[in-house]
Image: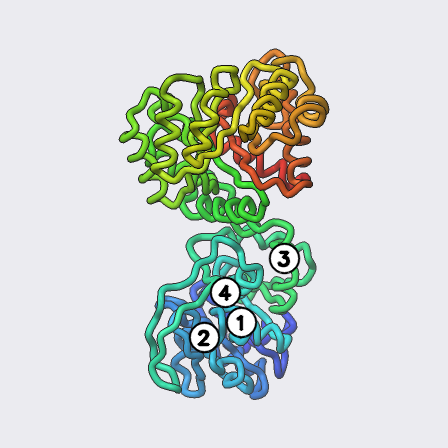
């Protein structure tokens, strides 16, 4: 059994004093038996803070704890008006801290109680609870404008100025690994820890908390996400971060449909989970497009688009009499590009593509760069426009240095797509940047020129892993450039 005086003593030993402002997250049960319960605990805080100090608690959900309830129900309590992030406060700055919360642009940053507490030099106190209950970390997420944050649905609620309807951007969603931040905060030297009763108490200046975690978030936008591959919350939130990062590139990152899955729904699910927003449609049900009926391809395109994916191109793995039909299908479905293997017989399709308004890009399979360059030059001399899809793994298999020779000396001016795939000189597939395709060099030099074409994670990556593996490798490459 502990009493009010022991709580007061413990809070003073932590460093709280008259005039301080404290945002309290708490569990009464964590302290053991408390004489006077929640009421005595609140009185202990108010005694330490004095009439000029202010005690604040979050009350935006039911079940925030009996101590929060005691503050909320206190006769001197002031509540902020907000349907999703409200607080209750007692003390000298209660009115100022709670003022016009609902008018703020976001629920947790400028002009909200959470940032006002930090601006006043106030504290965050975790009494018998961990960082998972630390609402100020939502402030940090919103200040960083992390890509997985959402805009809330519109809420209609009462305010001192009458009924209002409003939504808020950069609002937190599901689970994050706030618990994993505790070692960082301890090591910063900014957070004090003690025990009151049986409760472990953490006390840190709100601004120090924000500063330390903001820096961590700037270095790594996934800093509050767990690395559990089976977490139904953090996996899509990581995907949102990747999607935002890829979206800032001048090029478009796409995945081969064959790499992502067999069926359109599976392809869409895998792409979204990996943070990919675009698809190159090259196969369905492990069958190339030339073996599928146009209606089946069109239906798949509709499914992918309905799932929010952009279909950037159709691709054939061989040159056949079905290619003109695919060009016509691309026109009907408003798909801008067709990728076909470069061969003498394939050049005949260039006028058909031109007349249909479809961009034609030739990919190298077993030809060296000199042969590829000769064909492309001849086409241009004939007034035919065509791009080139550069596959460094295939050039390595031809015994060439893909970046230093194939690209720089022969094909630089033709490239409108990069196949992101790797392999050794003997043709053995490898993870990205582990073979001889000089893929890192290719990605880097194209980024230096603000390359506006596509970079496609091709089906060749299936031989060394999954779409997720390929995206992870690609992401690491970007982060190290």
Q: How crowded is mark 1: few (under 14 residues within 10 Å), some or many (20 or more)?
A: many
Q: Mark 1 points at which residue?
A: 114
Q: Which residue lies furthest to the top in this view?
A: 426
Mark 4 or mark 2: which comes first in sequence? Answer: 2
Label at residue 87: 2
Q: What element carries label 3?
A: helix
Q: In this view of the protein, which residue sits in the foreground, 472 or 354?
A: 354
Mark 4 or mark 3: which comes first in sequence? Answer: 4
Label at residue 389: none
Find out whether the residues at labels 1 and 4 contact each other: C-beta distance under 8 Å: yes
Is residue 423 among what the camera can see? no
Q: Image point 51% across, 53% down: which residue?
A: 147
Find out whether the residues at labels 1 and 2 contact each other: C-beta distance under 8 Å: yes
Q: Is residue 409 left or right of residue 90?
A: right
Q: Image point 53% across, 45% down: which residue?
A: 242
Q: Image point 63% across, 54% down: which residue?
A: 218
Label at residue 185: 3
Find out whether the residues at labels 3 and 1 contact each other: C-beta distance under 8 Å: no
Q: Distance between the Cα atoms at labels 1 and 2?
A: 9 Å
Mark 3 or mark 1: which comes first in sequence? Answer: 1
Q: Distance between the Cα atoms at labels 1 and 4?
A: 8 Å
């Amino acid at each position: 059994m502990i009493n009010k005086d022991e709580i007061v003593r413990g809070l003073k030993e932590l460093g709280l004093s008259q005039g301080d402002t404290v945002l309290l997250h708490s569990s009464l049960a964590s302290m053991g038996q408390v004489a006077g319960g929640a009421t005595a605990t609140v009185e202990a805080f108010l005694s330490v803070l004095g009439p000029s100090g202010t005690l604040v608690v979050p009350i935006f959900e039911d079940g925030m704890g009996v101590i929060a309830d005691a503050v909320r129900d206190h006769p001197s309590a002031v509540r902020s008006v907000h349907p999703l992030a409200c607080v209750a406060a007692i003390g000298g700055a209660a009115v100022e801290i709670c003022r016009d919360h609902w008018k703020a642009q976001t629920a947790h940053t400028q002009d909200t109680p959470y940032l006002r507490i930090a601006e006043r030099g106030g504290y965050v106190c975790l009494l018998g609870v961990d960082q998972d209950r630390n609402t100020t970390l939502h402030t940090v997420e919103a200040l960083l404008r992390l890509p997985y944050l959402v805009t809330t649905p519109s809420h209609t609620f009462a305010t001192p100025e009458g009924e209002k309807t409003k939504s808020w951007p950069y609002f937190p969603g599901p689970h994050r690994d706030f618990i994993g931040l505790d070692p960082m905060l301890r090591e910063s030297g900014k957070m004090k820890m003690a025990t009151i009763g049986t409760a472990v108490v953490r006390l840190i200046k709100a601004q120090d908390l924000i500063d330390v975690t903001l820096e961590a978030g700037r270095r790594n936008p996934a800093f509050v996400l767990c690395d559990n591959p089976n977490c139904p919350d953090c996996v899509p939130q990581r995907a949102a971060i990747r999607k935002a990062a890829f979206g800032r590139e001048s090029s478009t990152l796409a995945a081969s449909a064959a790499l992502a899955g067999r069926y359109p729904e599976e392809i869409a699910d895998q792409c979204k989970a990996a943070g990919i927003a675009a698809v190159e449609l090259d196969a369905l049900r492990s069958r190339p497009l030339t073996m599928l009926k146009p209606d089946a391809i069109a239906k798949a395109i509709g499914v992918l688009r309905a799932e929010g994916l952009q279909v950037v191109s159709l691709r054939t793995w061989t040159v056949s009499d079905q290619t003109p039909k695919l060009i016509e299908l691309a026109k009907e479905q408003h798909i801008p590009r067709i990728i076909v293997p470069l061969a003498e017989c394939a050049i005949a399709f260039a006028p058909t593509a031109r007349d249909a308004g479809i961009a034609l890009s030739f990919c190298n399979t077993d030809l060296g760069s000199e042969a590829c360059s000769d064909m492309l030059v001849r086409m241009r001399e004939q007034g035919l426009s065509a791009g080139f899809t550069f596959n460094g793994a295939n050039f390595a298999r031809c015994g060439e240095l893909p970046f230093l020779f194939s690209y720089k000396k022969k094909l630089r001016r033709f490239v409108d797509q990069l196949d992101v795939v790797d392999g050794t000189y003997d043709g053995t597939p490898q993870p990205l940047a582990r073979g001889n395709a000089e893929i890192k060099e290719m990605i880097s030099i194209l980024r230096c020129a603000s390359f506006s074409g596509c970079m496609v994670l091709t089906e060749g990556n299936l031989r060394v892993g999954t779409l997720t593996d390929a995206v992870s490798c690609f992401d690491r490459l970007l982060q190290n450039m």
